[in-house]
């Protein structure tokens, strides 16, 4: 019997917890010193990591995109090495994943999975142990960006907010360039610093909260922009807790004359589609950060398509998976994808028929 990648993906999702437990049990049995090295808390984190590995693998399989799985492993390698977990532990984990899947899934599955694990094994050694900075010094606002980040990391909220407001007042920044050339790369850099174990989750959340507070200072000017009779609903799909990217897109659309309804993080499809219908939205802009949220994104798009009041709504998607696989947006049922906030405005206008 032929087994499809989508069928295997569904089985992996359903069995992810059990498979993760099998992988960790195998690895700790093969290397008894791991218990002494990591302890019970470390073992629990290994379980969580293995679960994530399987969820990413499932999404990559469903769309036949090995690159999505390999990219995730590159991210995981940086994360783990910066926390003192050597690459060989990740390599052993992948071998045990393949073994657990071979023992659990129907005959024929291993042949489909082989490409994913072979690519991972061949590319993992060359992947960097430290991710490059997002704050490249080739920008007119490079110094301001660096100062803003330093103030955030020092916990100087008032000074950080004032640095941006003063730059806008001096016409060194516009609202648009503050979003695209300062906030966006700084938020990426904050995420990188957490990945590199150089800041805590609390610091990461603080930086995001301060950036949102600066953005709120611009709202009177955003909402005073001339209206153009266009409406959009913006959200992160169910399960995705990253919201600042969507908020930036909503604000940039407002700045360009749109009326927007920003629904925030982890918006369920059963709430999203009716809201888009009630607002008579021309565009629904949806984002995901993690590849394993692709099923929720597809479900949200299907709900919009099924809502009679959304007959004119066009779906615009964004997020890292679509940067890695530029044609993936078609397979989730979207009408277009945007690489960043600037492109989102341009494409939204095109989708609404008002370039």
Image: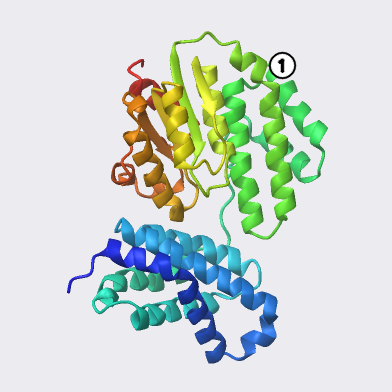
Taking depth in this image into account, of 352 and 327 the one nearest to the observer is 352
User: Residue drawn at (54%, 44%), measured in percent from left and top?
Assistant: 266
Report which quarter residue 104 is drawn in. Answer: bottom left
Image vertical order of residue 153 relative to residue 259, above or below = below
User: Which residue is labeled 1 in the image?
Assistant: 169
287 vs 347, left or right, is: right
Find residue 129 and report its horizontal and vertical position in percent.
Answer: 56, 65
Taking depth in this image into account, of 98 and 7 the one nearest to the observer is 7
Q: Secondary structure at mark 1?
A: helix
Total numbered badges shown on the rendered structure: 1
Q: Is residue 65 visible?
A: no
Outermost residue, left side = 1
Q: Quadrant of the C terminus?
A: top left
Taking depth in this image into account, of 111 and 67 the one nearest to the observer is 111
Find residue 30 and report its horizontal and vertical position in percent.
Answer: 52, 91
Report which quarter residue 265 is drawn in. Answer: top right
266 vs 19, left or right, is: right
Find residue 117 and report its horizontal and vertical position in percent.
Answer: 36, 72
User: Residue drawn at (37%, 77%), measured in percent from left and top?
Assistant: 101
What is the crowding at mark 1: few (fewer than 14 residues within 10 Å), some, or many (at least 20)? Answer: few
User: Residue drawn at (49%, 71%), measured in percent from left and top?
Assistant: 17
Image vertical order of residue 58 relative to residue 29, above or below = above
User: Residue drawn at (60%, 15%), measured in percent from left and top?
Assistant: 223
Q: Quadrant of the N terminus?
A: bottom left
Its colouring scheme is: rainbow
13 vs 33, left or right, is: left
Outermost residue, top side = 226
Find residue 268 and report its horizontal and vertical position in percent.
Answer: 49, 42
Q: Is residue 248 visible?
A: yes
């Amino acid at each position: 019997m032929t087994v499809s990648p989508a069928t295997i993906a569904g089985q992996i999702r359903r069995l992810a917890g059990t498979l993760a437990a099998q992988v960790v049990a195998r690895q700790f049995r093969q290397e008894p010193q791991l218990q002494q090295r990591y302890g019970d808390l470390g073992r629990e984190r290994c379980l969580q990591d293995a679960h994530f590995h399987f969820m990413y693998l499932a999404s990559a399989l469903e769309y036949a995109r090995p690159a999505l799985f390999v990219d995730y492993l590159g991210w995981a390698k940086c994360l783990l090495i910066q926390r003192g977990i050597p690459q060989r532990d990740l390599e052993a984990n992948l071998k045990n994943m393949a073994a657990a899947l071979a023992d659990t899934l129907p005959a024929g599955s291993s042949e489909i999975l082989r490409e994913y694990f072979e690519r991972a094994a061949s590319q993992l050694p060359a992947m960097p142990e430290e991710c490059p900075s997002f704050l490249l010094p080739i920008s007119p606002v490079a110094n301001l960006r660096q100062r803003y980040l330093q103030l955030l990391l020092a916990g100087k909220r008032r000074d950080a907010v004032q640095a941006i407001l003063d730059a806008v007042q001096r016409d060194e920044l516009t609202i648009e360039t503050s979003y695209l050339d300062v906030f966006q790369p700084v938020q990426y850099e904050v995420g990188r610093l957490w990945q590199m174990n150089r800041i805590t989750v609390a610091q990461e959340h603080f930086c995001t909260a301060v950036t949102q507070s600066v953005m709120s200072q611009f709202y009177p000017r955003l909402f005073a922009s001339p209206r153009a009779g266009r409406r959009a609903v913006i959200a992160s799909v169910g399960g995705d807790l990253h919201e600042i990217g969507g908020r930036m897109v909503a604000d940039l659309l407002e700045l360009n004359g749109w009326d927007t309804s920003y629904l925030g993080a982890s918006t369920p499809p059963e709430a999203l589609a009716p809201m888009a219908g009630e607002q008579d939205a021309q565009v629904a802009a949806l984002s995901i950060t993690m590849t394993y949220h692709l099923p929720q994104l597809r479900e949200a798009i299907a709900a919009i398509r099924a809502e009679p009041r959304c007959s004119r709504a066009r779906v615009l998607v964004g997020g890292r998976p679509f940067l890695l696989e530029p044609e993936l947006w078609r397979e989730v049922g979207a009408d277009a994808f945007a690489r960043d906030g600037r492109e989102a405005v341009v494409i939204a206008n095109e989708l609404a028929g008002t370039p």
